Image (cartoon, rainbow, N blue to C red):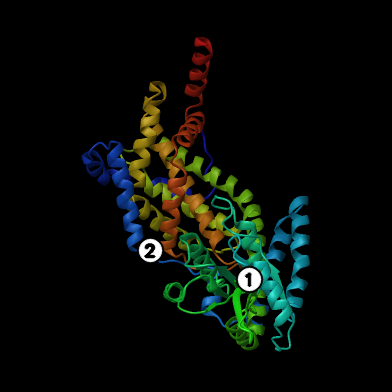
Amino acid sequence: MVVKLQRPILVGGLGLSFSLWILESWHDSIVQLGEYSVLSLLLVGGGLLLLKQNRSKQDSHILDSLPVDRETVESAIAKTETVINHLAGEAENDVETLHVTSLLREKIPQLYTELDRKEIHLAVTGGKSVGKTTLIQVLTSNWRPGIGRQICLQEIAPLFVEAGENSDAAALAQAKATDFILFLTNGDLTDTEYQTIQQLQAEKHRLMLVFNKQDQYLADERASILLALKQRMQENIVAISTSPLPVKVRKHNDDGSVQEWMEQPAPDIEQLTQQLGETLAQQGQQLVWATTMRKALLLKAEAKNWLNGVRCDRANPVIEQYQWIAAAAAFANPVPALDILATAAINAQMIVDLGNIYQQKFSLEQAKTVAGEMGSLMLKLGLVELSSKVIGTVLKSHAVTYVAGGAVQGVSAAYLTRLAGLSLVEYFQQQEVAVNSANRFNIEILGQTLQKVFQQNQQVGFLQGFVKQGVKRLLPEVADEKMITAETVA
């Protein structure tokens, strides 16, 4: 097979192959790995990364570090518009993507209008039969907050009615679209209720836990439940009775007769209306801005997903090109240990090309450094040795292909280059969309991404198919011969 190497770095990388003789003794001394040893190797590699884990800051945490004011929200909307403009510029003639881009762009003016919204939207949610409808009726009839803003109450479909991980997704999405959430419960929180509240709080949704129907408990039980709720929630808890149980009233008349009847007490919601009124009066504008911020970030994420899809379609052929260049280089110049240096040299040019697609500009020298660090990570995590052994095992099952000495190195080099390329794509997709920026690589995050991509691409079925592709490219005559033999046997 003849491969034309048109870039100087590729030629330089091939020249480094002789340096790997020093690895031969180390390579030969490694004990043959069984299934349990392979698992141990993966666990050790995973542990190295977990010890150095450094989580990156994501858009979903932007409300943690920045004050929610008008300027911050307008900046978020502007960044969202930038991503949409990138999508429009890179969609080219893709009709579907251009249509989606148009729909996304139409939402930008709506976000700016949202900033000046005078209504505050409240969601009333919780499980079945907790009193959501009654609470809305009572608040609508009896509550006049007097904060200069209209209050819009929205009842959300009951939660926890059906089993299933995503059974409440639609109802929660409705609640999350509002400015403030009233979460109703009839007693101490179940694990499911508590996890849902934690999820909402983690996503920075403002809520108040409402203990309804407190009148149905004895005084001691009521106090115990309220204490348990406060211990779990710390704050923003109120106890109410939207529809208290009827109370028997007895009247003794002057003539000695006694009259009895059932009387319906008035709703007990004073604690709720007072606390809620104070919150909305003090933070009403910030609640509206926070909701607008969340909508802007969601719109940005949607646009970025589409943009990543467009770029990924352009990146995949680049990765495939370099993986087979790496395969040809290792196959043509096999050594006892996989030529990770030559592979790193080829990966450097791939980094430059992929960076261009994601508008992350890197010089060749920067790319060489990153490629070397990725190669070191692969060695440290045991991916080089493990990949060679797994691919060698697949090739051994077909004696005809295994006789070619460089087949294992060639296919392994292609596989590792593919892992590097896919890891780079995922890493770039996590970054902020920018124009021709020159960002430094976070090698720890890149290492975490590399391990994740490796785990996603080690299935037996995928490896068998990948090896088959490699054999066709590196040994076309052997592949044809096997095919002819198979057809003859059939």
Residue 94 makes an appearance in the image? no
Q: Position of residue 301 (x, y in %)?
A: 63, 63
Residue plotted at (73% across, 77% down)? 140
Q: Which residue is mark 2?
A: 53
Residue 293 in the image: above or below residue 37: below
Residue plotted at (49% across, 14% down)? 485
Q: Secondary structure at mark 2?
A: loop
Under mark 1, the amino acid is: Arg
Q: Which residue is mark 1?
A: 294
Residue 421 makes an appearance in the image? yes
Q: Position of residue 10 (x, y in %)?
A: 47, 48
Given this view, does label 1 or label 2 mark the residue nearer the observer?
1
Residue 464 in the image: above or below residue 81: above
**Viewer-nearest residue: 63 or 156:** 156
Under mark 2, the amino acid is: Gln
Residue plotted at (72% across, 65% down)? 85
Q: Position of residue 284 (x, y in %)?
A: 66, 84
Q: Examine the image and state in which quarter residue 118 appears.
A: bottom right
Inter-mark Cα distance, 1 to 2: 27 Å
**Viewer-nearest residue: 75 or 433:** 75
- Please tell me which of labels 1 and 2 falls first in the chain: 2
Question: How dense is the environment of label 2, judged by Cα within 10 Å: few (below 14), some, or many (20 and up)?
Answer: few
Left/right of residue 394 with respect to residue 357 in the rendered view: left
**Viewer-nearest residue: 246 or 152:** 246
Residue plotted at (64% across, 62% down)? 173
